[in-house]
Image: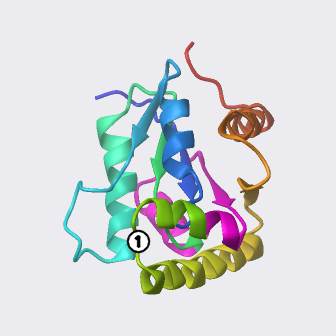
């Protein structure tokens, strides 16, 4: 078993902000892997347990990666607890968010009903406050296209001295 451990990027945000789009773009780079928890485990699993399972999967299944992107919605403290439990030394969170009108439009295009969209909006507000309080990098996807957001994430990698594809 290798002693190498990938850097973990926890790409956080509510439904409709572009997490999956950006995670797919990142995973196309050599040395970057993607954990997309949707469908990996049952819907009855709680958020804390899901966060722990995603981080465990990243460190056990992708040891040869330089960076593993985890695309999901989670509380900042759950991320910290899961990183600690899995002895992850390099992990950061980036919150993607967008304005209410853009999120609503994106979710309506997915066919979601109004009550579901309203629940997601409340959750988005909570995630925003949680991430802001934690001092995480936060990127507004309503202001920029996916290519620009991708570039901002790569700037974070440079700032954090994360490299991939070596």
Q: Quadrant of residue 41?
A: bottom left
Image coords of residue 36 (percent x, y): 37, 48
Image coords of residue 98 (percent x, y): 69, 63
Q: Nearer the viewer, residue 122 or 89?
A: 122
Image coords of residue 81 (percent x, y): 49, 69
Q: Nearer the viewer, residue 137 or 124?
A: 124
Look at 49% across and 72% down and name the residue there: 78
Residue 88 showing in the rendered view: no
Q: Quadrant of residue 62?
A: top left
Image coords of residue 132 (percent x, y): 76, 72
- Above-or-below relation of 117 to 102: below
Q: Is residue 141 left or right of residue 8?
A: right
- Indicate how the structure is coloured in the image: rainbow
Residue 119 showing in the rendered view: yes
Residue linked to disc 1: 112
- The segment highlighted magenta reads 77-103
- The image shows a total of numbered marks equal to 1
Look at 45% across and 29% down and name the residue there: 4
């Amino acid at each position: 078993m290798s002693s190498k451990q990938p850097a973990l990027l926890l790409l956080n945000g509510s439904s409709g902000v572009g997490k999956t789009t950006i995670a797919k773009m990142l995973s196309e780079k050599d040395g970057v892997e993607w954990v997309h928890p949707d469908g990996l485990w049952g819907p009855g699993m709680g958020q804390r347990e899901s966060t722990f399972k995603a981080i465990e999967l990243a460190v056990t299944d992708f040891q040869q990666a330089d960076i593993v992107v985890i695309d999901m919605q989670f509380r900042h403290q759950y991320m910290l607890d899961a990183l600690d439990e899995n002895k992850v030394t390099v992990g950061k969170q980036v919150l993607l968010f967008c304005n209410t009108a853009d999120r609503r439009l994106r979710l309506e295009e997915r066919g979601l009903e109004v009550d579901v969209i309203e629940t997601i909006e409340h959750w988005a507000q909570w995630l925003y406050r949680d991430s802001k309080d934690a001092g995480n990098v936060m990127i507004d996807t309503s202001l920029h296209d996916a290519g620009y957001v991708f570039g901002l994430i790569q700037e974070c990698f440079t700032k954090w001295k994360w490299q991939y594809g070596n």
